[in-house]
Image: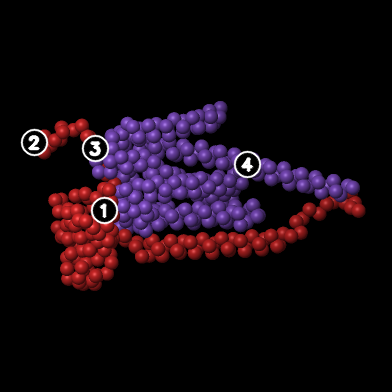
Amino acid sequence: MLNADAPLDLTPVAAPMVARRGRRRTIGVLVVLALAVIALLSQGLLHSLNYFETIPQAMQSRVKLGTSTIRLEGVVKANTITRTASGASFYMTGGNNQEVFVSAHGSPPQLFQANIPVVVVGHFTSATSDRFYGTQILVKHTASYVAAHPTRVKAPNGTTR
Amino acid sequence: MMKQLSQRLLGPVTFVLLALTFWFGLWVTPPDQIQGNWARLVYVHPAVAWVGLYVSFGTATIASVLYLWRRTRSPVMDRIAHCAVEVSVVFIALTLITGSIWGRPTWGVWWAWDARLTSTAILGVFALGYLALRRANDDPELRARRSAVFAILAAINVPIIHFSVQWWKTLHQGATVFTANRTLLIHGIQAWTLLISFFAFTLLFFWLLRARYRLEVLRDARYELSLDEALTQRRREGVR
């Protein structure tokens, strides 16, 4: 029987246990979090902090690159695209007017067209060749947005009206 | 009076601006010269990313700093930070989803492990970690303090995400609005629609934050009430 006049001791008796459990849980969360971040970092940033090599960069370290797989960036040269049964071939230009012939397998993205920047995953066909064999084409579109005007017509001198 | 009016108007104004964004984005604006109709995602994806990365994480960081500062420390700041991070999880997820939907037809892949995408995914993991950390601690004061420190540390990633397209070579395009030389790369009705979308999604964030905050207040009140009831119950047991 409890005495009604006696002050009640409402101190939580299991407080130290709860604190320990909270600390264990916190450490658990932080460990899982650290593992997730390390996994993302190793996959994304440490292997490809710079996602691609530009053509001048690739040409400069041509011997070192050999036939290893890289991501090569450049602009698709106009009037050089040839659609093949297995993909497309075209010339890609970079800074200093350097050109690389690309023969890519697999269907290119919807936006693939002349004068568009692309990143081609693949490798040079030999240690000294300027021919690049691509296994995947990625379109790297610019940050500019220009409204299309389908009603405009092209004048004989090439201007739009 | 003004506060009440602004609170009452927040929902309807948000709804009108969102409706305007979708109307302009889908019917009024022309397609893009290169991206065609896919460019219409520019009226959703950047605005959602703006809210997920800058507005909500910024709100959480400011509230966390104010909680850690003794003069302004209050459960209100902790609640605001908590609710802002919860809303940010939704917006970060939307950012990654709309980005993927955009990436497939434009880049040709759903996902690329470039610096911008990876650092955004890491922020999403940080936001989930923040919420997990809150659940791991039962002591409200300790929970608030640890969460505040964590939110501030996680926010360091936000400038890394922002400048990733300038610091490194990424597949993700550079800035269209917040360019390094402050030149807009979008014009006319497209630019206006983009601006409306930024306002619409920012207001949506504050509307969601307010709703979530009120829910949190009610939850705390219910917890206090149940605690009082438990104490009364124990007292009654003592009397018998």
**Which of A85/A99 is in front?**
A85
Q: How many neighbours does mark 1 have within 10 angstroms: few (below 14), some (14-19), or many (20 or more)? A: some
Residue bearing the label numbered 4: B217
Disc on the earlier residue, 2 or 1: 1
Contact? badges 4 and 2 (CB < 8 Å): no
Task: Provide the residue designation for mark 1.
Answer: A108
Q: Residue type at mark 4: give it.
A: Val
**Element type at marker 3?**
loop
Q: How is the image coloured?
A: by chain
- Between label 2 and label 1, give the one nearer the viewer: 1
Q: Residues within 10 Å of mark 3 (few under 14, many from 20)?
A: some
Q: Is residue B30 visible?
A: yes
**Which image quarter: residue A57?**
bottom left
Label total for image: 4
* 3 or 4: mark nearer the eye: 3
Write down the residue under mark 3: A148
Apparent colour of chain A: red
Q: CA distance from mark 4 to mark 2?
A: 70 Å
* Chain rendered purple: B
Q: CA distance from mark 2 to mark 1?
A: 32 Å
Q: Between A92 and A83, which is closer to the camera in this rendering? A: A83
Chain designation of label 4: B
Q: Secondary structure at mark 1?
A: loop
Residue sitting nearer the eye, B146 or B216:
B216
Task: Look at label 2 and name its amino acid.
Answer: Pro
> In the rendered view, would you say B185 is above or below A71?
above
